[in-house]
Image (cartoon, helix red, strand yellow):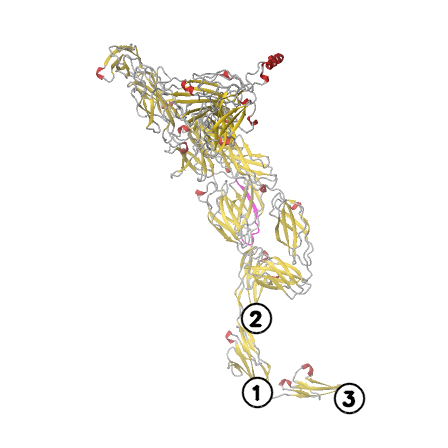
Amino acid sequence: MGVPLPTLQWYKDAISISRLQNPRYKVLASGGLRIQKLRPEDSGIFQCFASNEGGEIQTHTYLDVTNIAPVFTQRPVDTTVTDGMTAILRCEVSGAPKPAITWKRENHILASGSVRIPRFMLLESGGLQIAPVFIQDAGNYTCYAANTEGSLNASATLTVWNRTSIVHPPEDHVVIKGTTATLHCGATHDPRVSLRYVWKKDNVALTPSSTSRIVVEKDGSLLISQTWSGDIGDYSCEIVSEGGNDSRMARLEVIELPHSPQNLLVSPNSSHSHAVVLSWVRPFDGNSPILYYIVELSENNSPWKVHLSNVGPEMTGVTVSGLTPARTYQFRVCAVNEVGRGQYSAETSRLMLPEEPPSAPPKNIVASGRTNQSIMVQWQPPPETEHNGVLRGYILRYRLAGLPGEYQQRNITSPEVNYCLVTDLIIWTQYEIQVAAYNGAGLGVFSRAVTEYTLQGVPTAPPQNVQTEAVNSTTIQFLWNPPPQQFINGINQGYKLLAWPADAPEAVTVVTIAPDFHGVHHGHITNLKKFTAYFTSVLCFTTPGDGPPSTPQLVWTQEDKPGAVGHLSFTEILDTSLKVSWQEPLEKNGIITGYQISWEVYGRNDSRLTHTLNSTTHEYKIQGLSSLTTYTIDVAAVTAVGTGLVTSSTISSGVPPDLPGAPSNLVISNISPRSATLQFRPGYDGKTSISRWIVEGQVGAIGDEEEWVTLYEEENEPDAQMLEIPNLTPYTHYRFRMKQVNIVGPSPYSPSSRVIQTLQAPPDVAPTSVTVRTASETSLRLRWVPLPDSQYNGNPESVGYRIKYWRSDLQSSAVAQVVSDRLEREFTIEELEEWMEYELQMQAFNAVGAGPWSEVVRGRTRESVPSAAPENVSAEAVSSTQILLTWTSVPEQDQNGLILGYKILFRAKDLDPEPRSHIVRGNHTQSALLAGLRKFVLYELQVLAFTRIGNGVPSTPLILERTKDDAPGPPVRLVFPEVRLTSVRIVWQPPEEPNGIILGYQIAYRLASSSPHTFTTVEVGATVRQFTATDLAPESAYIFRLSAKTRQGWGEPLEATVITTEKRERPAPPRELLVPQAEVTARSLRLQWVPGSDGASPIRYFTMQVRELPRGEWQTYSSSISHEATACVVDRLRPFTSYKLRLKATNDIGDSDFSSETEAVTTLQDVPGEPPGSVSATPHTTSSVLIQWQPPRDESLNGLLQGYRIYYRELEYEAGSGTEAKTLKNPIALHAELTAQSSFKTVNSSSTSTMCELTHLKKYRRYEVIMTAYNIIGESPASAPVEVFVGEAAPAMAPQNVQVTPLTASQLEVTWDPPPPESQNGNIQGYKIYYWEADSQNETEKMKVLFLPEPVVRLKNLTSHTKYLVSISAFNAAGDGPKSDPQQGRTHQAAPGAPSFLAFSEITSTTLNVSWGEPAAANGILQGYRVVYEPLAPVQGVSKVVTVEVRGNWQRWLKVRDLTKGVTYFFRVQARTITYGPELQANITAGPAEGSPGSPRDVLVTKSASELTLQWTEGHSGDTPTTGYVIEARPSDEGLWDMFVKDIPRSATSYTLSLDKLRQGVTYEFRVVAVNEAGYGEPSNPSTAVSAQVEAPFYEEWWFLLVMALSSLIVILLVVFALVLHGQNKKYKNCSTGKGISTMEESVTLDNGGFAALELSSRHLNVKSTFSKKNGTRSPPRPSPGGLHYSDEDICNKYNGAVLTESVSLKEKSADASESEATDSDYEDALPKHSFVNHYMSDPTYYNSWKRRAQGRAPAPHSVAILLTSNPSAYLSVAPRGSASW
């Protein structure tokens, strides 16, 4: 109580109740303290404080709590422990009295005050201790507490974890620097606990997050990539987990390649001139003991090569021996440890060893006897490594083989000369020869001696003891001894027996006898002349020639029977006697002792009489013969041996002989290839026997102009009727003729036989001059001289050549090739094996068979590229960037030359467009380590071998090998397409270099302002490409890191910054693009730029594009240039090419625009990328070759092409002549690099030059040529080598002085001179003659090959009278020379062809028009035509033949007017040049035609003062309607009907004409002919005769004429003087045609229609001309049957109103005359054109003028000739031939 009301506060044990915060304590409103649920701990002093402003007061009391039921002060809780540890389950209870504690598990008491079980113990606090805990102890445990006041319990769960322990502790590890080290730390643990690995290095914890190089895997393994020496140390792995901790330790050693040796010094070795001493300082061993050192050297700047490969590790110096004097050397050393070969030391300075004499002799010494006193020695230089300096020359020494004596020497002062001709030697003597090289230091080692003989000489002594004697009349025997051996001078090849007549020393008979080395030699010469004095001798011969003959000895052959007497003849032939004469035999064969003459009646041996005469008698008169009896008379000479051959002949007594007649009826049979049987009928024998038959023939070319040659003669066969003609040429055309000869002389020739062709036969000879040359690696070129035409022996189309060849080293069957072209001169045999020698033969063949084989020739193919790949190729990846390849060599048979090395072709599959190559030099290294490869990439690998020619075949199949995996590169193209204030979405692409299989990605990000180690890390799968980060701070910069993971760990991260803002835009393009010129190379440049604004969104990457000028498109070079970059190197550009570049930036929003283009940048020049192409070398002359090539492609020039360099050198393996084949037992392939002996020629020209000549080369040598292109930077790679043989070349000039001479109408003779000798380039093998018609070369050109070098040829079967052009080229074994300029010649004229057509028109019953066409083949200048016609059957018993000759070619038509109605005529027309050609024939029947109209009727003529009018009535129209009429007239002075008016309309029945059209004083008869489509009809009956006389007008009165005459006289006197000055007027003048018919009332055409008119008349014609006043015409002359010759005196002639413009000459002559021709004087004046002649033979009185003959006698033929001319130089002849019979 108090005022104010006091405040109360309770304390327990001096602690405010409020502070205890015990919910069981509650202060009541009355101020009291209530305690609920007392507990023992509630015991204590309780105080109550009351206070107000007036003061305070307190009181206290002690509360003692006793006998309280048990209460848990700490209940059991779930507990987790590790297996093997101690577990304590707590259970604290309060109560009074103190409760008793008991622990149970599943009703099993584990511990209590009275129970104890091992491992379970009850603690004082009431807890349960389990020690140690086992896994099976896990479960529920219950704590029971009880006292007198009560009991309670509580349970808890005990969880037991498996203990965490390291089961795979890290092990000591040694790794190579730069590789990845992996320290494993494998542990077992309870799956319910998590582990934490802590790695320490040297007790310092590692923080993997600070570097991407150190990574702790989930399994606890520690991965350290890119290890280096700083990673060496002790590493401990500690595992921290709720299941226990554990730790292990291991040692990591990092080893690396040893460092390069230092202070490498080289010094000469004082004790050995071929060695030097190297010393160095031991390098750092790379934490791995050095195993050995490698010493490499470079000789004369050549590539480095290993010289010492295993120098002990303890060494710091070594002596390098085996060096070559006079060469410069550099050395370098590297150390090798367990890791591999370290870097090389710095190179030593160059050291040149002193020069020494060559240490090896020249090689491949070859000696061959060149002549009998010289030996050619050839060699090759010593191996280059043995030169020991620069070679200055060679010393050749020689001496007699096998004999002691001093050497003689020859000094060859040029090292390039590798041959020497040793002269002045002894004939056929063996020498031993040695060669040594020398240089500036002295003479080297002599080669091993080679021995060789000089060639054989001719013997210098004759055979000895020669004896000769005649064995018979034709044989002499020889006996002799050989010459002394020392004088034979070679190998005795035999002996020659010589015999020659004493009176003819040039006719030497030679018989060769093989040597017989046992006893006396003997031999015979046979077939000598009988009873002849011969000088005989014997000589010995060797291969080079004949020795001297022995002394000649005179020997007579023995006497024998004589030959036939000569020139048997008969004179004084009477009825009972005749005189026989003869001459001495040509072959007396002894001394003629007399003659024996015999005679008998022909066919009666029993009448034979014989008489012997002395040797001086050469004639004998036989008497007592029977008259007119045929006798056989024989005469023979007699010697001491006997009677000789009988000469026989037949003769009739009383009948003198005369010349025989020609044989006839030649028949050819039994035709074979080389003979034929000629059967014939003998001609008149000339009343004596035939002594000889002579057969001539035309061979090959058959024709009247071809020559005849004698083929065969047969004697002493007087009764022959068949001859066998031998020695013919197979498959050749022949035509035969023959004549017979008797004692008087030869007969005329027989008619020619038919043309035959002998049968075919195989060729008799093989092609000649067969040579072989190397064409390529797999081919040989064979050349030969083809067979001439005369040796084909068969159809030329079937002639060809067969070539067989085989390898020289194999006895296998030969392979055959066929060449079908008979004119071919060379053939290339393909598909041969490379670098192989072959033997070849060839033969000619035709359709029948093959000829003989040629001699064997040999040739070798060229070295080539290997035809097979290396074998057993294998590959193994040794790291992520290295693959080791191994292989074995190419099979020897496929190497095709010397293997210079190998190339490895490798390409990343599906990544690299083209394979790259790695070269391994030499044939001994057969493995290679490819380094610098892309990681975890599948590579395609191939290996090939190469020779100096080029690359061989790559190995197959492709080897596939993948490099090992590694940590990946960073992902690319990281962008943030969605950025919000609190989240971003990140998108990326896989790494460009995955280096393995991507297992996942890790995204780490943090605020840019936070600690570098506070990244939030998220891992996603390998297929995820985007991630969204959330819960970010707005408007904040974040750093994102993205990395990929492979089996080898996490790769390098890609880092990017992003700002969580929504205010972003595309970036600005980069600016200030610049390419510094100093950064421009031939294939790359460096672009630098300044980035533009990033648009509030960081730039992620740049994209660069490049454009090639001038017309290239923009190409993307890279689209993943780092956002941090401000410069980039652009490579893979083309040299000397202009480019422009541009750039754009990309951020999360998108791409910027492209920047401005750079200025044009031109890359620098580089060496040309490829050599000239299609390089060929062709012999040009015998000492020069023509090099041709194609320029490199423009895109490979890489700059401005300056020119070309041609490198050439003489090849060593062929040095013989063009016809020799040399076999190489050990052929040595040449190196691809050019040796010192090579030469080169620079062609300074533009790329358009593709030809160059190399001159002054050695003959008969093979050269190798390669080419390079060059610019100012350098040379291109070399072209593939080509080979050429020098010494053969086609002729350089054409034949000279070509002349073409015509021989006949079908032949030209061409002659020429050979090309100048200096341009022939070898032996001319023949000529090619090209000829063609001058105006049509393409259609008519032909070529004739002449294989004989004779400069003349006849061109046959040419077109007549045609101009030909001829050109000639010469050829040799190397090819064709140039053609000569064409020369022209024209063949002679010949008979023309037949006219092209023959046509007839306007056929009436008595007339027709005939026309013809010009011959298609004129064959000359056409002079005119001959027209011959005759009736097919006699007319009124007379058959007349009319011949008309038309001069000139213009007129090709004729009017015939002497036909007989209804008679069929046979027409023939011929053209004429120098003679007449063949006829063109046709038949035609005179009208009227079938179906033509009938004759008009009632023809009436009325006459007025100036006109005539004809009237008629239409007759029958025929099969078709009448189309018109014609009027025919017959003048009284001519007597033949001729067409007078034509084309009168069908409707007309009358026609009026002026009397002016008729000739005055002549009476005319007229008749009308109707015309329809069938032709001209039957003429009407003639009209009455009408005179053409008209009444005279006044100007024809006498008084008018007198006045005009006087006036004219005065005028005439005035012009006489002028006429005298102008000379005699022309005799003939042209005149106008007068009035045209076209002026008439109706359109008509005059009779002749432009055709010449031909008329024949039997009446005697008056020569006097009658002239009309109007037109001055006269009637033509009329020939009498006896024949007249006359010519027109005037030209202005007119007949029936048509102008006559022809000169006419008429003759009639007997059939004995061939034709009539006018003299030149008759036609000396100019003649007009368009002429015709009228020739009448229609008057019946003509036939009556012929003399009648008795019946049965043939009529005498007659002819009439008429000449028609159409130009001043033409004439026409008509020759009618007629006959009559009664």
Tag 2, which secondary structure? loop
Give residue 480's position: percent from left, percent from top: 32, 21
Q: In the image, what residue type sits under mark 2?
A: Glu
* Residue 1751 falls in image quadrant: top left
Pointer 3 with pointer 1, Cβ within 8 A: no
Q: Quadrant of the C terminus?
A: top left
Task: Specify the label residue 242 is tagged with.
Answer: 2
Q: Residue furthest bottom?
A: 1
Q: Earlier in the sequence, mark 3 or mark 1?
A: 3
Type of the residue with mark 1: Gly
Residue 1670 visible to the viewer: yes
- Left or right, 1437 with respect to 1571, comes to left
Q: Which residues are magenta?
A: 274-288
Left or right: residue 1029 versus residue 927 is right
- The verdict on residue 1065 being magenta is no
Viewed as shown, does residue 629 lie left or right of 1524?
left
Q: Quadrant of the N terminus?
A: bottom right
* Image quadrant where residue 675 sits: top left
| Magenta stretch: helix, strand or loop mostly | loop
Q: Amino acid at mark 3?
A: Val
Q: Nearer the viewer, residue 719 or 1293?
A: 719
How far from the left and from the top, in percent, is residue 343? Answer: 56, 49
